[in-house]
């Protein structure tokens, strides 16, 4: 294994000083193949962390530690650790994803966060922004039949009195926006930034596999849902690379609005009142 030379250059001739195991774990230089495994392991860890929220606290903790260990950026480590902690204490996915994603964004951009958003808006031309939104709406509409069938088989029950229609509409918009921001910042933000050393085809594979797997228990869910959301993630990556994060969030938002709007009439409000 190689260590950092006196002048800061990598030296392949220097012996490792950490022992046979320590040199593998702690040495500065790694074979390129091993370094390329880190974003893949990170993406898988994040997906399994999401799936594990239905399983056990031990699995959540294990995949959180693995995600933090395989991340190379402080911002990503902070986001994964936050997501794991919030998941452990039972915070719903939409809230935990949006909080963790925003933590990544702030840590990644620090004081330049607002400027990054402004540049993203300028980068997304009106035509491009409209096209991204339209593609997102079409992607969401394509999975509506699957989502509705899924909800009919396993109804979503909320233990409150049925609210007015305008409250339901606001909730749909708020949930869709929070979910789109959180998932885009985590996948097209943190994971994509960690995958810069991978080729574009491999980036598509990692994004599709990890984003799809994370939706195994979501909407849409099951293996069919994994496949469809995996394909949607490839679309979001293309939009992100061409038009930036703001456009990919818009596309994701329109997709979620199509899905959540189709599900809202099927939700069962099981609360009751004394009157």
Image (cartoon, rainbow, N blue to C red):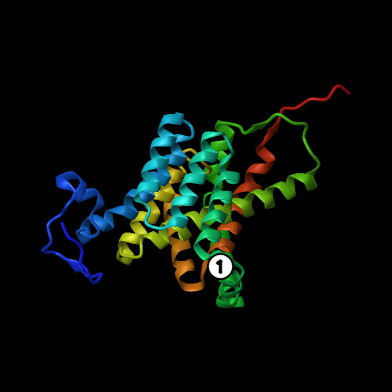
Q: Tell me if residue 141 can be seen.
A: no
Q: Is residue 99 left or right of residue 44?
A: right
Q: To which residue does mark 1 refer?
A: 247
Q: Tell me if residue 186 can be seen.
A: yes
Q: Position of residue 142 (x, y in %)?
A: 52, 53
Q: Residue at x 51, y 39 (%)?
A: 85
Q: Residue at x 59, y 38 (%)?
A: 91
Q: Is residue 171 above or below residue 35?
A: above
Q: Is residue 199 above or below residue 50?
A: below
Which image quarter is the C terminus in? top right
Assign a secondary structure to mark 1.
helix
Q: Residue at x 24, y 49 (%)?
A: 25
Q: Is residue 106 above or below residue 45?
A: below
Q: How many marks?
A: 1
> Viewer-proximal residue, 135 or 243?
243
Q: Is residue 23 above or below residue 235?
A: above
Q: Position of residue 159 (x, y in %)?
A: 70, 29
Q: Position of residue 108 (x, y in %)?
A: 50, 62
Which image quarter is the N terminus in? bottom left
> Viewer-proximal residue, 262 or 31?
31
Q: Position of residue 64 (x, y in %)?
A: 42, 41
Q: Residues within 10 Å of mark 1 (few under 14, many from 20)?
A: many
> Viewer-proximal residue, 144 or 246?
246
Q: Residue furthest top?
A: 274
């Amino acid at each position: 294994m190689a260590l950092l030379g006196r002048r800061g250059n990598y030296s392949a001739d220097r012996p490792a000083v950490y022992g046979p195991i320590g040199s593998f774990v702690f040495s500065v230089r790694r074979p390129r193949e091993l370094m390329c495994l880190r974003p893949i392991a990170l993406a898988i860890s994040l997906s399994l962390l999401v799936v594990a929220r239905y399983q056990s606290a031990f699995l959540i903790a294990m995949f959180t530690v693995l995600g933090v260990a395989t991340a190379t950026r402080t911002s990503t480590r902070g986001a994964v650790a936050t997501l794991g902690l919030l998941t452990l204490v039972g915070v719903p996915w939409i809230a935990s994803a949006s909080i963790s994603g925003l933590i990544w964004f702030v840590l990644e951009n620090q004081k330049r966060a607002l400027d990054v958003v402004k540049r993203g808006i300028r980068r997304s031309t009106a035509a491009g922004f409209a096209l991204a939104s339209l593609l997102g709406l079409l992607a969401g509409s394509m999975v509506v039949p699957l989502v509705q069938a899924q909800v009919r088989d396993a109804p979503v029950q909320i233990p409150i009195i049925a609210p007015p229609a305008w409250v339901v509409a606001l909730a749909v918009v708020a949930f869709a926006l929070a979910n789109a921001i959180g998932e885009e910042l985590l996948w097209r933000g943190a994971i994509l930034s960690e995958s810069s050393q991978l080729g574009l085809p491999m980036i598509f594979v990692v994004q599709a596999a990890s984003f799809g797997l994370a939706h195994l228990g979501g909407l849409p869910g099951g293996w069919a849902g994994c496949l469809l959301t995996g394909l949607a993630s490839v679309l979001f990556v293309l939009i992100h690379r061409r038009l930036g994060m703001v456009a990919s969030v818009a596309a994701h938002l329109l997709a979620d609005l199509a899905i959540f709007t189709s599900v809202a009439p099927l939700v069962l409000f099981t609360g009751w009142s004394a009157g």
